[in-house]
Amino acid sequence: MPFFYDLQNSFTTSGTPLTEVTQMWAKTIANQETVSLFGVYFTARGAVAGGASGRVKHNTGTTASGGTSQTPSPKNLRGGPAAQSVWANGGTAITPGGTLVTRLGIGYAQTGGMGGYQPPMQNAAIQMMPNATNPVDLEFTQLAASASVPADMTIDIGESI
């Protein structure tokens, strides 16, 4: 039976314009289920006009490390089990993984626009396989045309799919 979760992360873009920063990473745990990416949404709250981009990357090299542990929230609050994946946000420094491949680019406006991604059907979702096999993790990055833009990212995932 599939279970669905979400994660929300507020952050500030780099103090240097157009500098990409890893804001979150995730991996599966041993002998558990697949994780499918069902939605990624970015929005900003800046005062200066310009564009920003969120990216989703898969990693086939060394797993990312660091960050602050974050627990996915179950969508069904009446009985969803704990998520079977590990997530960390950029509350503390993240060291990106070794071999990253950009899978998605999501544009959004620095002045409050939203950009997002949802797969057109369930089978089209980006997946992480059990036991941190290829890809070993997913990483979520962002960059903006201006420095220090406050922004939010929301991620929707499904497990056992």
Image (tube, rainbow, N blue to C red):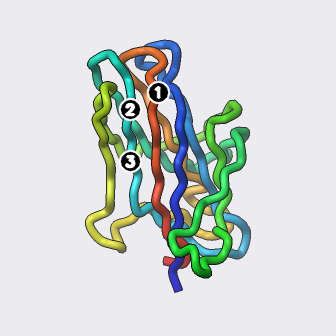
Q: Residues within 10 Å of mark 1 (few under 14, many from 20)?
A: some
Q: CA distance from mark 1 to mark 2?
A: 6 Å
For residue 41, the mark is: 3
Frontmost residue, 114 versus 22 = 114
| Amino acid identity at mark 2 | Ala
Tell me if residue 62 comes above or below residue 30 in the rendering: above
* Left-right relation of 134 to 55: right
SS category of the residue bearing label 2 = strand
Which residue occupies 33% across, 26% down? 110
Q: Residues within 10 Å of mark 2 (few under 14, many from 20)?
A: many
Q: Which mark is residue 44?
A: 2
Q: Are marks 1 and 2 in contact (CB under 8 Å)?
A: yes
- How many marks do you count on the picture? 3
Residue to which mark 1 is pinned: 150
Residue 119 at x, y = what percent? 32, 62
- Marks 3 & 2, CB-CB < 8 Å contact: no
